[in-house]
């Protein structure tokens, strides 16, 4: 059984894949090709992507899409509709207006924001399951799957690894980590996954989690920021105001079986108070989490007590 690691630059982040297998090289090459294909098809920043075909036809025509993209948009709409959800996949026009995380980031005018808010309406994503079509009912609408796509991709890559007989694996899509099988460097077989300290530079961890056959997703207001006139804005938007969310939370980590679930809930819960986030996660089957507040408080699900290393 051989080990091999691959580092890939895709999706605006550094991706690391590690596997144990008799023939790891070919499997990792195929995994990279799959990730590259997903990025091309699901990107909100590539005018040739399948997703952009939907956005370009907003207010005009429905667009037939492949099963996986339809599945992800359906999931995203479901979690965008609750009134207390900070996840909204129709936030695309706001993302493009602010451009936080890009070189041309700017603070828009109040009027520009008000105009975009009129089309940030997830209920106006019209889905036809039988025909596998997506229609955006208002001109100018745009879906952005950035808040859940990496989790979906990680799950698909893990499915591929398992289908190929991979014995152990770690998938790191930049803040989105999936562990599978035994960690060979630890006697107990558990991987150690560092949780980024939100007030320090990357690589400084506030704690580590022991993990096996789990997904660990962390989302924080430190990930992509933009500062103008002495005020710093982060990339998680409040679709009611058009501005980045006002929150006491610096980061949320969700531990789950499926990575897409962790991706969804790290964003969905950002509008809640820290204690409420933990209570909500505890009520969801198969989910647990960690919250770090701006003032440095650490809250976590009791079920994680045995996994936390400080």
Image (cartoon, helix red, strand yellow):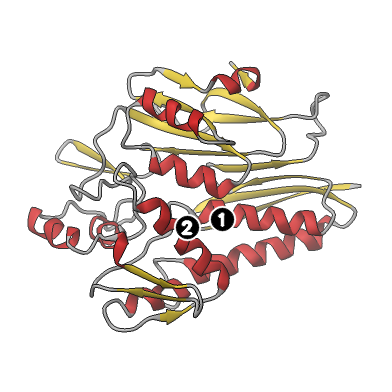
At x 25%, y 50%, the residue is 239
**As drawn, 8 above or below 232:** below
At x 66%, y 67%, the residue is 33
Q: Mark 2–mark 1 contact, CB under 8 Å?
A: yes
User: Which element type, helix, strand or loop, lies under badge 1?
Assistant: helix
Q: Residue furthest bottom?
A: 61
Q: Residue furthest left?
A: 111
Residue 14 x %, y %: 56, 50
Q: Earlier in the sequence, mark 2 or mark 1?
A: 2
Which residue matches tag 2?
75
Q: Nearer the viewer, residue 170 or 143?
A: 143
Residue 49 appearing in the image: no
Instruction: Answer left or right for 24 relative to 302.
Output: right
- Badge 2 crowding class, 10 Å Cα cut-off, few under 14, some 14 to 19, many 20 or more, is some
Could you say which quadrant of the image residue 27 lies in? bottom right
* Quarter of the figure with the C terminus: top right
Instruction: Answer left or right for 259 relative to 102.
Output: right
Which residue matches tag 1?
152
Question: Residue 13: which disc?
Answer: none
Instruction: Answer left or right for 144 relative to 71.
Output: left
Q: Alpha carbon of mark 2 to alpha carbon of mark 1: how far?
A: 10 Å
């Amino acid at each position: 059984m051989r080990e091999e690691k691959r580092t890939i630059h895709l999706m605006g982040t550094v991706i690391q894949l590690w596997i144990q297998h008799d023939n790891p090289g070919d499997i990792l090459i195929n995994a990279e090709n799959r990730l590259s294909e997903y990025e091309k098809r699901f990107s909100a920043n590539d005018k040739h992507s399948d997703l952009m075909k939907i956005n370009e036809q907003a207010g005009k025509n429905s667009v037939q899409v492949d099963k996986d993209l339809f599945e992800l948009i359906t999931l995203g709409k479901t979690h965008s509709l609750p009134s207390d959800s900070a996840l909204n996949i129709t936030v695309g026009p706001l993302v493009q207006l602010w451009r936080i995380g890009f070189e041309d980031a700017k603070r828009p005018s109040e009027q520009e924001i008000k105009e975009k808010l009129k089309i940030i309406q997830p209920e106006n994503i019209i889905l036809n399951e039988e025909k596998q079509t997506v229609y955006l009912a208002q001109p100018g609408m745009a879906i952005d799957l950035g808040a859940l796509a990496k989790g979906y991709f990680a799950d698909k890559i893990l499915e591929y690894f398992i289908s190929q007989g991979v014995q152990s694996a770690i998938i790191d899509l930049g803040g989105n980590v999936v562990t599978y099988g035994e960690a060979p460097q630890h006697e107990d077989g558990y991987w150690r996954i560092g949780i980024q300290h939100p007030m320090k530079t990357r690589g400084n961890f506030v704690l580590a989690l022991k993990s096996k056959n789990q997904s660990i997703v962390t989302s924080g207001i430190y990930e992509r920021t933009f500062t103008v006139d002495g005020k710093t804005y982060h990339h998680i938007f409040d679709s009611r105001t058009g501005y980045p969310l006002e929150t006491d939370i610096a980061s949320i980590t969700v531990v789950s079986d499926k990575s897409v679930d962790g991706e969804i809930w790290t964003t969905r819960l950002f509008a809640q108070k820290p204690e409420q986030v933990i209570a909500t996660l505890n009520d969801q089957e198969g989910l647990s989490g960690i919250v770090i507040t701006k003032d440095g408080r650490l809250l976590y699900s009791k079920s994680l007590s045995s996994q936390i290393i400080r």
